[in-house]
Image (cartoon, grey):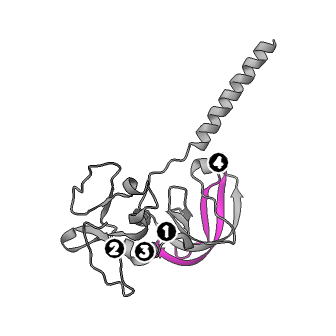
Amino acid sequence: MQSVHRSLMSLLFIFSTLQVNQLTEGCSCALTHPQDAFCNSDIVIRAKVVGKKLLRDGPFGTMRYTVKQMKMYKGFEKVQHVQHIYTDASESLCGVKFDINKYQYLITGRVYDGKVYTGLCNMNERWERLSLAQKKGINHRYQLGCNCRIKPCHYLPCFVTSKNECLWTDMLSHFGYPGYQSRHYACIQQKEGYCSWYRGMTTRDKTTINATDP
């Protein structure tokens, strides 16, 4: 009888371990350049999170964060002013955890039925951690490159195959985000539809563009 009990307990332990592993490994996101995160989002705002409430829907629930919007960069045609952000309550389902009344955040997300949803695969970052180039990109530069394609290079050799592509090599030199290109460059469309990496070098934001740099 004792051996049967031990066997049952072992099976329960193995099953629970598998379940925990499935939950903790449930969220997987591909590396994304901030420009792609901007262009692929319905909403991009800077906001301070001032409250939260767990809504009892689904197996883990949904966390509703109340935000004080500081500025909207994208999404005016979908939501005029964001008051709440929704995300899965469980990080294993890609739910985001925001600190309350501490920081201003860059928050990106999608709009469904008039509600703004975000997750770990969206770009959500404390504002002060963004580089100056990223802040300028969010303000206006990234929008200029939404018709461009940022092509990830995971191993050499890799090449652009279209005039609207910029080769993203952060995975080679900086082991992924946040690499140098992610923090300092935007892929901007130039004349005749060609796209190239762009970095502002002066306070007046007048720069030359080098298609091979970085």
Is 195 within the magenta?
A: no
State the quadrant of the N terminus.
Answer: top right
Mark 2 residue type: Leu
Specify the segment rendered in magenta. Answer: 60-89
Q: Which mark is residue 58?
A: 4
Mark 4 residue type: Gly
State the quadrant of the C terminus.
Answer: bottom left
Asked if disc 1 and disc 2 are in contact, CB closer than 8 Å, the reply is no
Which callout, 2 or 4, points at the residue further toward the start of the chain? 4
Residue position marked by numbered label 1 in the rendering = 43
Which callout, 3 or 4, points at the residue further toward the start of the chain? 4
Q: Local crowd at mark 4 within 10 Å, few (<14), some, or many (≥20)?
A: few
The image shows residue 125 at horizontal and vertical percentages of 55, 66
What is the distance, in whole Å, between disc 3 and disc 4 at their CAs?
39 Å
The image shows residue 12 at horizontal and vertical percentages of 71, 26
Count of numbered marks? 4
| Residue 106 placement: quadrant | bottom right
Which callout, 1 or 4, points at the residue further toward the start of the chain? 1
Q: Residue at x 70, y 28 (%)?
A: 13
Asked if disc 3 and disc 1 are in contact, CB closer than 8 Å, the reply is no
Task: Name the front one of labels 1 and 4.
Answer: 1
Residue position marked by numbered label 2 in the rendering = 144
Q: Residue furthest left?
A: 192
